[in-house]
Amino acid sequence: MESGLITTMARNLFLQSQIKSRCSCTAKSNYTLIKLTTRRWQHSKPVESREVTGVMKAWQIRRYGGNDELTLSESVRAPRILHPDDILVSVSAASLNMLDIRMREGYGRSMINAVRNRDRLHAPQSEFPLILGRDFCGTVLKIGMKVKKFRAGDKIWGTVSPFRQGSHAELTVTSESHVSMVPSNLTEIEAASFPYVVSTVMTALCDVGELKQSNTANKRVLIYGGSGGIGSFAIQLMKAWGAIVTTTCSTDAVPLVTSLGADHVIDYKTQNVQQELLNRKGYDLILDIHGGVDFSFDLLKKWNNSKFVTIKTPFLQNADDYGILPGLLRSGVNLTTNVLQGLKDGRSYRWAMFKPSSKHLRTVKQMIEKEEIRPVIDKQFSFMEADKAYKKMEEGHTRGKIVLNMAQ
């Protein structure tokens, strides 16, 4: 099913796991750092009418391109449960992520369409119209025959794989393995800001970077770009587990990342980032969010199983540019070259991608309920203003997350 991309990637890029075992010898933005409250689950819109009419409102694109391709459609056919582990959700709120901007532009289309057509997650051979949006908070309406952990009426948060129609709509369908019960101390808007970054960051730091609560204390971790949605969550996760965190950001974001617990903050507008980081080198793990930092390998500890983990991989782009099979081969060459660079001194280079995970959502749910992690929201838009939200996201330099409120 929609896990096919991950399976294919693992099969074709097996070298990464082999090397892993061997190595083990700039405009100002108003953000809100939300304090957890007791306001919970206020639904202002009934969902029964959507089921009766069989249509919904959704933001769609009919071809790849810029923000002007986004259109609000008011009579989109409601999604259906197609697989026994599917869950139909009434979306209360959904966030925006850079992946939405890139998919709007056509990123990943070759591989994603191949998986969609194989698993019949869209109508046969249907690429458009396409609904974007990769995470949400909402209410369960219907469940597939094999769904055991949830029932109609449950309040959940979760992700939608890139192979399905997205969450920037009144209704969405996802898999049971991609959701969990929502934290009890979050509002719908707050909850919607988390699932995509949780799945991305914990795939990178835990599944690929091999960090966990029991082995992270006093590890030195560098996070490039600490003020965005991914960075702000990564800082909090690492600090909750006892890491010593260094991060980079612009001048106006220094108070935010400091309040999240970062031990060392490097302002790339006023400081020489390369020199500052070289002065502090000796990191156990580096999380690369944006790519393009050529000197990073020199910052890792030698002969200590230290890791450079990037979520800015060429995997899907190579498939778009060269075709699926040639793209896979080219990606394999790219990865091999980077991995071999670290073999000589016991460091490793690794790729990570967004991978939905209910396990990670459950872990973070507990941490949020203990107030170890807080939501950071830059701005909230009404669902009808989604095009404005996309524009702000595309401008960059957000402080935390941008969230769509379906009730407005």
Image (spheres, rainbow, N blue to C red):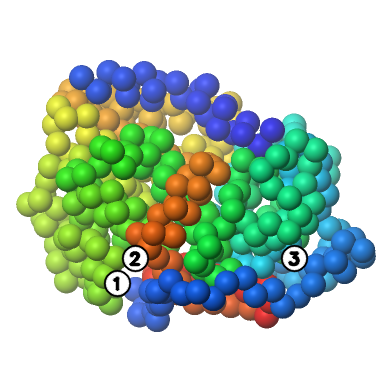
Instruction: Judge whether 169 appears above or below 220 on screen.
Output: below
Q: Earlier in the sequence, mark 3 or mark 2?
A: 3
Q: Which mark is residue 256?
A: 1
Q: Quadrant of residue 149?
A: top right
- Confirm whether residue 264 shows in the render: yes
Question: Residue at 41% across / 48% down in the picture?
Answer: 201
Q: Which mark is residue 170?
A: 3
The local crowd at label 2, few if under 14, some if 14 to 19, many if 20 or more residues have their Cα within 10 Å, is many
Q: Are marks 1 and 2 in contact (CB under 8 Å)?
A: yes
> Seen from this angle, which residue lies furthest left?
279
> Amino acid under label 2?
Ser
Of badges 1 and 2, the one in the foreground is 1
Query: Relative to the observer, which residue lies in front, 248 or 104?
Result: 248
Q: Is residue 301 left or right of residue 87?
A: left
> Where does residue 129 sit, x and y in percent of width and height?
77, 56
Q: Is residue 239 left or right of residue 194?
A: left
Q: Earlier in the sequence, mark 3 or mark 1?
A: 3
Give how far apart the Cα atoms at labels 3 and 1 are: 32 Å
